[in-house]
Amino acid sequence: MSATGRRPPHSRERGFTLIEMLVTLAVAGLIAGVAFPRVQNTMSAMEFRRGAAQVTEALRAARAEAIRTGAPVSLALEGRALVIGGGDPVALPASVRVTAGQDRPVTFYPDGTAEPALYRIRSRSEGAVRERRVTVFGSTGHIAESGQ
């Protein structure tokens, strides 16, 4: 500024006006409002897939252990955890529910066969229900997944 209190005509102050800042914040809020539900849904889907994979992998591990050791190995669903033989429980993700179609643990035998079993893995979030089935075929011990 000059001694007279006026700005020289070629000088201009740099910065944002209050209106520019408010418009920027409104646009950022709108983008966040649209993106957040998608991110939350994606996280829920990933947790569901992880829970289903845990069940499938635990069944395959129990079968492999029976074949490797030459002794029957059971997989039990205890509350919110899977237990192979007498091992440590493997906790399932909080939003995933697993139910067994039978009242007893599934047992795999040294020849690779098993007692038939069915597990339903479910997850519900934001009104969307995801379900996957994992089936153990008794005569072969084969483990198959079906569903979302």
Image: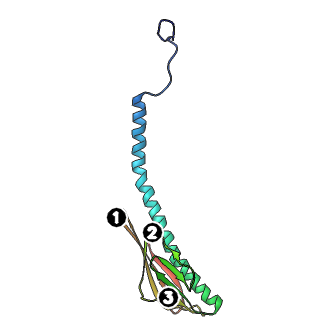
Q: Which residue lies furthest to the right in this view?
A: 68
Report helix, strand or loop for mark 3: strand
Residue at (50%, 23%) from the top-left corner?
A: 14
The CA span between labels 2 and 3 is: 23 Å
Q: How crowded is mark 3: few (under 14 residues within 10 Å), some or many (20 or more)?
A: many
Specify whether 124 is left or right of 86. left
- Foreground pick, 115 / 82: 82
The percent coordinates of residue 116 (x first, y second) are 47, 90
Relative height, residue 12 to residue 55 (above, below): above
Counting residues from the start of the chain, the first of labels 3 and 1 encountered is 3
Report helix, strand or loop for mark 1: loop
The CA span between labels 3 and 1 is: 32 Å
Relative height, residue 115 to residue 15 (above, below): below
**Which amino acid type is marked by label 2?**
Ala
Pointer 1 residue: 127
Pointer 2 residue: 94
**Which amino acid type is marked by label 3?**
Val
Mark in the foreground, 2 or 3: 2
Q: How crowded is mark 2: few (under 14 residues within 10 Å), some or many (20 or more)?
A: few
Residue at (49%, 88%) from the top-left corner?
A: 106
The reply to whether callout 2 and callout 3 are in contact (CB within 8 Å) is: no
Residue at (43%, 33%) from the top-left corner?
A: 21
The CA span between labels 1 and 2 is: 17 Å
Mark in the foreground, 1 or 2: 2
Report helix, strand or loop for mark 2: loop
Counting residues from the start of the chain, the first of labels 1 and 2 encountered is 2
- Foreground pick, 148 / 101: 101
Pointer 3 residue: 106
The reply to whether callout 1 and callout 2 are in contact (CB within 8 Å) is: no
The reply to whether callout 3 and callout 1 are in contact (CB within 8 Å) is: no
The percent coordinates of residue 55 (x first, y second) are 51, 77
